[in-house]
Amino acid sequence: MNFRRYATTLILGAALLVVGCSSGPGADDQFVDLANNYLGRMLELNPEWATNLGDHRFDDRISDLTEAGFQARVDFNRAYLDTLGSIDADHLTQANRIDYEILKERCESVIFMISEVKEYKWNPTMYNPGDGIYNILARDYAPLPERLAAVKERLLRIPQVLEAARTNLNNPPPIMTVTAIRQNPGVIKLVMDGLQPYLDEAPEMKDELSTARSRAIAALDHYGQWLESDLLPRSNGNFRLGNELWHKKLKFALSSDLTPEEILTSAENDLAATRDQMYEIALPLFREYFGGHEDDTSPGKDGVIRRVLARLADDHPTNDTIVPQAREGLEKITEFVRKKKLVDVPDDPVEIIVMPEHQRGFAIGYCDSPGPLEESGTTFYAISPTPRDWTAERAETFFREYNDYMLLNLTIHEAMPGHYLQIAHANRFEASTPLRAIFSSGTFVEGWATYAEQLMVEVGFGGPELHLQQLKMRLRLIINSIIDQKIHTAGMTEGEAMEMMMIDGFQEEAEAAGKWIRAQLSSTQLSTYYVGNMEINGLRRAYEKKAGKNFDLKTFHNEMLSFGSPAPKYVAELMDLD
């Protein structure tokens, strides 16, 4: 999708917005003009995000992260929200009415996050400038000298970002500052070493970037010292969002009609049901691996599951083998999806890489697809090695968690037919505005990826070993939603969370410890997996009921993926499902 097809003259003030909607064209034309103007101005206010989405008009700029810059975003969204209210949504087409709701929710969310959550005052990881540099280098969207010239401008502005951090940050939670401290050397390495191969390809740019690089490195080094010696000693804030803010934020994160109470009750019921299903799958494997039959002297249901999982965990990759092993797995999975005709498989390139250092510390893997506004590009499926300061014993527990079977499941989730495939479909979506592609619903995106895991098992990929690991991953997404809610609203302790993950969820210590960190660093995002999975499965049940004997998996999947990435409730409306 090319945003330039949608770009119109930028509207910079509320007065002009009101004039634009007061008379003349009908409601649909008014909304499309308003939405496309909002997108243009929004991308200008957030240049790094624009780069990530594939709009490269602002690659030589950085976001204004000062207090005034954040207030400007609030004022901007309030102006558009007020003008949006002047449009009669009842007179819009179905597609535009859904986009209207998405834009309205987006404006409200930005205002809430800045005005009430105020994360810019207590989360130093927000000021990590690494992605703004990396995303220009990683994608070959323009001649290298042109991209390096943009990198130079962003390098020169890094001191401004770090100065805004020093001014804004006040009493962060310790985990936020510790994570920023761990990430900062990765940013320095990116500027110092990661940039060098590109300069070797364009040696005429070396002198031009020399000063910018040295200033950025010096600023980052000084910032790292400040984080450790100044900010960390006074980082005593509470990472828990609290009941009121968490409930409000969850509403925006999920865009779902489910209440937190309904989600928690459903998750607790599904936790027990999934553990029972795991026992049914594990028992035949237990007999195969260890002989005999379960009887009164056997280890019990939990013991059977644990012994089988422990046996499967013996087959695991290492830091040296995990990436090539994932590549081999992706080839097998892609061939299987095509053979089974589960969904249209895109030809877009996908590359498995080692996660860049400046991005580590949050998750084991991620899918970095080209943005919906990018003309073309490669999807990067990144996998993080274990941190260098981990003991050999802790690294061993990590790879036992991400054993050969779990790695296959992760590749299904992140790549095929999970995130890579879904986002490739979403990037082909076209409408009067690209709102649904740009403001993607985490509930839909994560819901599809977790549904993809169960789909592959359902159609016979991987056998009972993979099925057991998929159910273990299902336990993980269920527990994610429980601990997300209880940590941030009910004071769940680290010990209680670790016990639930390791005992109820059969997780290795390293995985559970990492998730505890992630739960502190984020809020509400961990709930998107379970709720999304519930709602995507709900779409399938409704579609099967509607189609009856004519139900076809590929037809269902292709249609569901054809609308961009809106929240599942909007997909149900677009597919005319009850």
Image: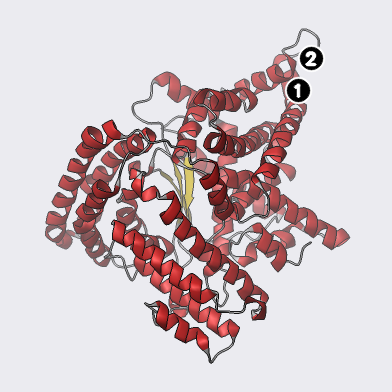
Question: Is residue 239 positioned above or below 159 on the image?
Answer: above
Image coords of residue 414 (percent x, y): 54, 47
Query: Which amino acid does the dot numbered 1 rest on?
Result: Leu
Residue 539 visible in this rendered orientation of the protein: yes
Residue corresponding to mark 1: 283
Q: Residue at x 26, y 39 (%)?
A: 185
- Mark 2 — residue? 294
Front-most of residues 480 and 553 = 480
User: Is residue 2 in view?
Assistant: no
Q: Residue at x 49, y 32 (%)?
A: 516
Query: Which secondary structure, mark 1?
Result: helix
Q: Amino acid at mark 2?
A: Glu
Labels 1 & 2 near each other (Cβ < 8 A): yes
User: On screen, 1 above or below 567?
Assistant: below
Point out the tag, 1 or 2, that comes first from the N-terminus: 1
Label 2 residue SS: loop
Q: Is residue 163 left or right of residue 337?
A: left
